[in-house]
Image (cartoon, grey):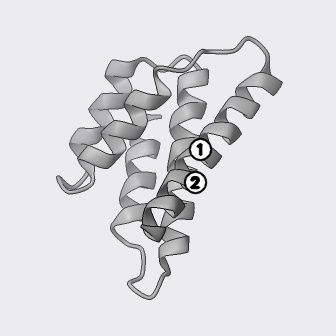
């Protein structure tokens, strides 16, 4: 599971074409947040999630760490529907923050 997360981060942030728009970048960040929250809802430990940072380029680690820490402040839900809703809501929250920051 950790390898899958690390590979996703790497592909999402390092191999993204320079022609991609900032909107695409915010979408990737939102999807990353969704994956992080999905792992949080599945019970992955904070320690395990933070270890994925070691596999990322140094310039990506601070932003991903912030997303992880915010995700791990959230409640873990009991039902699969609520877990999915939590992941989707978190994706939208993080993507909205990215989009808003671009406007400033």
- Quarter of the image where the C terminus is located: bottom left
Q: Secondary structure at mark 1?
A: helix
Locate residue 88: give its quadrant. Answer: top right
Q: Which mark is residue 96?
A: 2
In the displayed structure, 88 sits above or below 24; it is: above
Q: Position of residue 85 (x, y in %)?
A: 75, 32
Q: Residue at x 20, y 57 (%)?
A: 59
Image position of 4 (left or right of 64): right
Task: Give the crowd class for mark 2: few <14, some 14-19, many >=20 residues within 10 Å.
Answer: some
Q: Position of residue 52 (x, y in %)?
A: 32, 37
Q: Residue at x 49, y 29 (%)?
A: 71
Q: Residue at x 27, y 54 (%)?
A: 60
Q: Secondary structure at mark 2?
A: helix
Image position of 8 (left or right of 66): right
Q: Give how far apart the Cα atoms at labels 2 and 1 are.
A: 5 Å
Task: Identify residue for label 1.
Answer: 93
- The single residue placed furthest to the right in the displayed view is 81
Nearer to me, 101 or 11: 101
Q: Which mark is residue 47?
A: none
- Circle 2/circle 1 CB separation < 8 Å: yes
Q: Position of residue 101 (x, y in %)?
A: 44, 61
Image position of 58 (left or right of 7): left
In the displayed structure, 22 sits above or below 37; it is: below
Nearer to me, 24 or 43: 24
Q: Position of residue 99 (x, y in %)?
A: 53, 63
In the displayed structure, 44 sits above or below 34; it is: above
Nearer to me, 46 or 94: 94
Q: Residue at x 54, y 72 (%)?
A: 24
């Amino acid at each position: 599971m950790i390898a899958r997360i690390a590979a996703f981060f790497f592909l999402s942030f390092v191999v993204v074409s320079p022609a991609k728009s900032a909107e695409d970048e915010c979408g990737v960040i939102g999807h990353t947040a969704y994956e992080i929250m999905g792992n949080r809802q599945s019970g992955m430990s904070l320690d395990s999630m933070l270890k994925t940072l070691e596999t990322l380029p140094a310039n990506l680690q601070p932003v991903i760490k912030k997303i992880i820490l915010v995700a791990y402040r959230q409640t873990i839900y009991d039902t699969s529907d609520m877990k999915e809703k939590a992941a989707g809501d978190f994706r939208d929250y993080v993507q909205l923050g990215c989009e808003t920051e671009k406007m400033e």
